[in-house]
Image: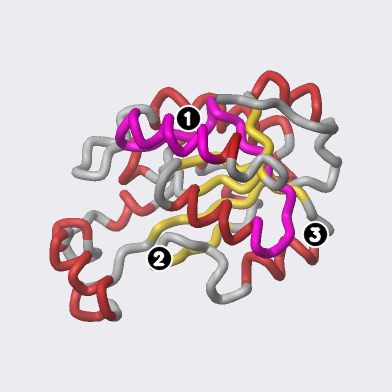
């Protein structure tokens, strides 16, 4: 479901690209099948306004035992994705996005949400942003956590449906419906074509 934008995106908006990393794009246990399809859309969005791009990366712990609480159980289950086993380069952004990261900020996080330590919010406020264009993976996990935190912090969220994806079509589709219906006053679902015309 895409409800469309209520008004244009301000020039000060930030494109916040969530966890578009090699671990989700390439052949790993966490590969999101649709990631390769949305990646060119995200690259195009970055190329149009490289000065307004910000990236996050999901960074696994060095070892499962270092994680807190229920995260320790999670990483015990996914020990193959912790840093001693996982090649370090797979934590990098997807290869087509790496040139943009040479000048754009990249925020690493060890949990789903990027907001916990306050660094991302501080950077966005410093750059005068009150609107976020959110892209990346996964619609129902890290993108969800990013959007909910942004809403709590008062950001206007623009969500192009063709620039986010999940590992399962069913939960992706349901989350897009939830964003468009339950959070319609704070999250505006759109597509990249409309966004190109709305963000100049």
Per the rendering, the mark at residue 39 is: 1
Q: How crowded is mark 3: few (under 14 residues within 10 Å), some or many (20 or more)?
A: few
Residue under the point 48% across and 62% down: 113
Spatial CA span between label 2 and label 1: 22 Å
Please, is residue 116 above or below residue 50 in the view?
A: below
- The tag earlier along the polypeptide, 2 or 3, is 2
Q: State the residue position of label 2.
A: 111
Q: Residues within 10 Å of mark 1 (few under 14, many from 20)?
A: many
- The tag earlier along the polypeptide, 2 or 1, is 1
Between disc 2 and disc 3, the foreground one is 2
Q: Where is residue 139 in the image (x, y as percent from the top left)?
A: 45, 41
Per the rendering, the mark at residue 127 is: 3
Please, is residue 95 above or below residue 115 in the view?
A: above
Spatial CA span between label 2 and label 3: 24 Å
Q: Does the magenta stretch include residue 165?
A: yes
- The tag earlier along the polypeptide, 3 or 1, is 1
Please, is residue 159 above or below residue 13 in the view?
A: above
Spatial CA span between label 3 and label 1: 25 Å
Residue under the point 51% across and 25% down: 40
Q: Where is residue 124 in the image (x, y as percent from the top left)?
A: 73, 61
Q: How crowded is mark 2: few (under 14 residues within 10 Å), some or many (20 or more)?
A: some
Number of numbered discs: 3
Residue under the point 84% across and 32% down: 8
Residue under the point 65% across and 63% down: 152
Secondary structure, mark 3, is loop
Left or right of residue 196: residue 167: left
Please, is residue 89 above or below residue 153 in the view?
A: above
- Tell me the quadrant of the picture where the C terminus can be found: top right
The region drawn magenta spans 151-178
Q: Where is residue 2 in the image (x, y as percent from the top left)?
A: 61, 25
- Tell me the quadrant of the picture where the N terminus can be found: top right
């Amino acid at each position: 479901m895409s409800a469309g934008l209520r008004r244009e995106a301000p020039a000060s908006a930030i494109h916040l690209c969530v966890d578009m990393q090699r671990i989700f794009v390439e052949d790993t246990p966490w590969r999101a099948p649709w990631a390769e399809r949305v990646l060119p859309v995200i690259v195009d969005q970055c190329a149009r306004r490289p000065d307004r791009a910000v990236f996050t990366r999901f960074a696994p712990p060095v070892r499962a035992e270092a994680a807190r609480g229920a995260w320790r159980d999670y990483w015990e289950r996914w020990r193959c994705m912790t840093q001693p086993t996982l090649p370090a380069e797979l934590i990098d952004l997807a290869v087509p996005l790496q040139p943009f990261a040479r000048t754009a900020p990249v925020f690493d996080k060890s949990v789903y949400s990027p907001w916990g330590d306050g660094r991302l919010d501080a950077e966005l406020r410093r750059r005068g942003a009150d609107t976020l264009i959110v892209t990346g993976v996964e619609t129902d996990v890290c993108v969800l956590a990013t959007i909910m935190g942004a809403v709590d912090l008062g950001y206007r969220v623009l969500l192009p449906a063709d620039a986010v994806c999940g590992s399962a079509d069913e939960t992706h589709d349901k989350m897009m419906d939830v964003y468009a219906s339950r959070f319609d006053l704070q999250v505006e679902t759109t597509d990249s074509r409309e966004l190109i015309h709305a963000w100049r």
